[in-house]
Amino acid sequence: KQEVTQIPAALSVPEGENLVLNCSFTDSAIYNLQWFRQDPGKGLTSLLLIQSSQREQTSGRLNASLDKSSGRSTLYIAASQPGDSATYLCAVLGGATNKLIFGTGTLLAVQP
Amino acid sequence: DTGVSQDPRHKITKRGQNVTFRCDPISEHNRLYWYRQTLGQGPEFLTYFQNEAQLEKSRLLSDRFSAERPKGSFSTLEIQRTEQGDSAMYLCASSPQGRDSYGYTFGSGTRLTVV
């Protein structure tokens, strides 16, 4: 059974810092991995999608990497801003199922 | 197309009442998913449709829950005899066929509070 873990559960940084969020998964037979952002009380906004054959994806100040063999992904946020404050969720799609399996998220607070 | 739409955004109901939520996916997406999210947790899978066929249901989906997608377009999720434990955010997502190439797009969710 696929399990997804995110570390840390919460993170507080001053504005301008670069930071890394971690995601690990137990079954390396995945099709893709997706990072989402969730603002309080809102739905999920897709940030980056990494196919199983890819090593990384970039969008603006965000960079996500994938090491399928070790079951790990990282989300790197450069030059953090207060507007980046949110919960960041990673989710994997894989195996014989058609469903995304989510981690519990990292709650990020960027202090001005 | 404005993405995945969910209605209502918020629902407060008394314990024992029935509630129904609606999801309108992105029009060209033939796959539709329902998830439930409680406070501090990641979303948990409930069920998914490919066109009008319901292909998988989670064990979380008790017999009080039913989902339909009658014409392969919008979907409804009904909860009968609501309980306080049903209070959660109910999220809908859609994706095109070809799961390894495309990601999911989520709606804004329906927040259910059972009092």
Image (cartoon, helix red, strand yellow):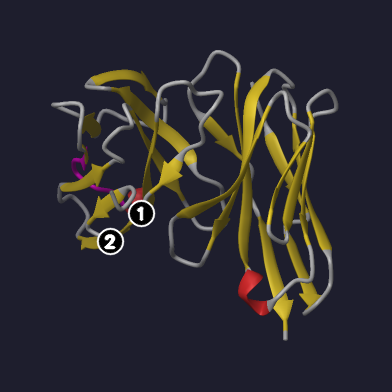
Q: Name the residue under label 2.
A: B9
Which chain hosts label 1? B
Residue B109: mark in rendering? 1
* Residue A79 horizontal side relative to residue B13, left or right: right
Residue pictured at 20% horizontal, 60% vertical: B13
Residue pictured at 31% horizontal, 41% vertical: B26
Label 1 packing within 10 angstroms: few (<14), some (14-19), many (20+): many
Q: Is residue A65 magenta?
A: no
Q: Is residue A56 above or below residue A111?
A: above
Question: What is the span of residues highlighted in magenta in the rendered image?
Answer: B78-83
Amino acid type, residue under disc 1 in the picture: Gly
- Secondary structure under tag 2 reads loop
Residue A17, image x, y percentages:
84, 72
Of the two numbered discs 1 and 2 on the same chain, state the one appearing first in sequence: 2
Residue pictured at 19% horizontal, 44% vertical: B81
**Labels 1 and 2 share a subunit:** yes
Q: Is residue B79 magenta?
A: yes
- Secondary structure under tag 1 reads loop
Residue B18: mark in rendering? none
Residue B18, image x, y percentages:
15, 47
Q: Is residue A6 above or below residue A33?
A: below
* Residue A43 horizontal side relative to residue A109, left or right: left
Q: How far apart are marks 1 and 2 (CA)?
A: 6 Å
Amino acid type, residue under disc 2 in the picture: Arg
Question: Is disc 1 in contact with disc 2, using a CB cutoff of under 8 Å?
Answer: yes
Q: Quadrant of the C terminus of chain A?
A: bottom right
Count of numbered circles in the view? 2
Label 2 packing within 10 angstroms: few (<14), some (14-19), many (20+): some
Q: In which quarter of the image is the N terminus of chain A?
A: top right
Of residue B68 and residue A54, the one placed in the foreground of this image is A54
